[in-house]
Amino acid sequence: MKDEITYDDLKQHEHIFTLAPFFVLKMMAKKNSNLVRKFQTTIESHLDKLDEEQKSKLNLILESDVDHLQKLLRQAYEQTKLKQYELLSDPKNKEFIELNLNELRKLILKK
């Protein structure tokens, strides 16, 4: 079992990062929106369906340093040129990522 998230982990779940069009994600990041709260019911439904490996990877993400996650997102952008990765890797959006990871942690703890 690995103890940190890797670029390959991001690559496996690229579809998640592209669900929101770039311009929508950009607007939400700029406003520092709490996406977890806005999509709580959907997130809870998906959490209930995770297998053990998926839960383990989610825990790795939740335990990861945001700076490390942003470096991986930058690497993903360099490989794919997906604007969503570029946006999320921008240090200006660190607070947006931290907010949503913290909200996700709270949601998981309630379960």
Image: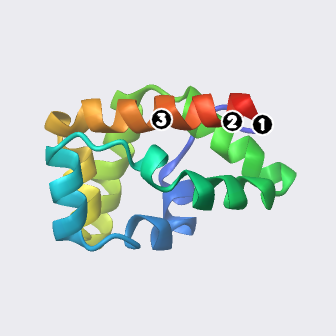
In this rendering, the answer to whether 101 lies above or below 81 is above
Asked if residue 4 can be seen in this view, the reply is no
Q: In this view, does 78 lie to the left or right of 105?
A: left
Element carrying mark 3: helix
Three-letter amino acid code at the position of disc 3: Leu
Please identify the quadrant where the C terminus is shown: top right
In this orientation, which residue lies closer to the viewer: 23 or 40? 40
Residue matched to label 1: 111
Asked if residue 67 can be seen in this view, the reply is yes
Three-letter amino acid code at the position of disc 1: Lys
What residue sits 75% from the left and 46% below the top? 55
- Discs 3, 2 touching: Cβ within 8 Å: no
Looking at the rendered structure, which numbered label has been put on residue 101? 3
Element carrying mark 1: loop
Q: Disc 3 or 2, which lies upstream in sequence?
A: 3
x and y, in percent, of residue 38 in the image:
43, 52
Looking at the rendered structure, which numbered label has been put on residue 108? 2
Crowding around mark 1 (Cα neighbors within 10 Å: few <14, some 14 to 19, many 20+) is: few
3 or 2: mark nearer the eye? 2
In this rendering, the answer to whether 31 lies above or below 43 is above
Element carrying mark 2: helix
1 or 3: mark nearer the eye? 1
- Discs 2, 1 touching: Cβ within 8 Å: yes
Please identify the quadrant where the N terminus is shown: top right
x and y, in percent, of residue 14 in the image:
47, 69
What residue sits 53% from the left and 47% below the top? 6
Three-letter amino acid code at the position of disc 2: Ile
